[in-house]
Image: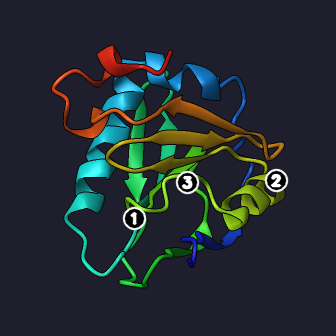
Amino acid sequence: MLIAVLLFAIRLSASTAGSFDVRSAADDPQVLAVMQDLALRGAHQVDQQEVAAFLVRDANGAISSVLWPHTANRRSEHYDGAVPAGTVAIAHTHPIFAERPSRGDIEQAREIRLPIYVITRWNLYVVDATGAVMPLIEKKNWARSPRPAEVRAE
């Protein structure tokens, strides 16, 4: 089975993950709302197309997303350009059958030194900047929950 691979051709700016705690993202309603939005956008794609975005922290500490231009590639997404100021992570969807981060996701997180979130309707994983994979939500329909913070993985 082919695994979705997120392809990057980005030039890193001075943006870094800084003090962004990748493990606590599932406890933060603001971050989960951004992830939920991406999951819903991904659910509307056809032919295993992915949706990707930068997670950006503004001067007040609020997290929002900056969507990548949609390329309509199958099982991958591509971004070419400068990373937005304040970027703390990258998030993208996977098809429901490819719930875990791919080898490409792990390699890219190490290379760009930013966490990468992998989103499906039933799962939320993160690959930290060292390449470690952590499940945040597993086998729960969190993406369609009105209050995703209540379905945090134990």
* Identity of the residue drawn at 74% across and 48% down: 14
| Mark 3 or 1: the one toward you | 1
Mark 3 crowd level (few <14, some 14–19, many ≥20, 10 Å Cα): some
Instruction: Return the x and y of residue 19 as percentages of the image width and height.
Output: 70, 23
Helix or strand or loop: what does disc 2 sit on? helix
- Residue named by callout 1: 95
> Which quadrant holds the N terminus?
bottom right
Please identify the residue farthest to the front as the structure is shown.
1
Sequence order check, earlier mark of 2 and 3: 3
Mark 2 crowd level (few <14, some 14–19, many ≥20, 10 Å Cα): some
Q: Is residue 60 visible?
A: no
- Residue named by callout 3: 84
| Mark 2 or 3: the one toward you | 2
Helix or strand or loop: what does disc 1 sit on? loop
Q: How many numbered discs, if any?
A: 3
User: Would you say the residues marked 2 and 1 are in contact, meaning their CB atoms lie under 8 Å apart?
Assistant: no
Indicate left or right for 105 with 136 as reference: right
- Residue named by callout 2: 110
Q: Looking at numbered disc 3 in the image, what kind of residue is underneath it? A: Pro
Sequence order check, earlier mark of 2 and 1: 1
Instruction: Return the x and y of residue 96 as percentages of the image width and height.
Output: 37, 59
* Identity of the residue drawn at 43% across and 66% down: 68
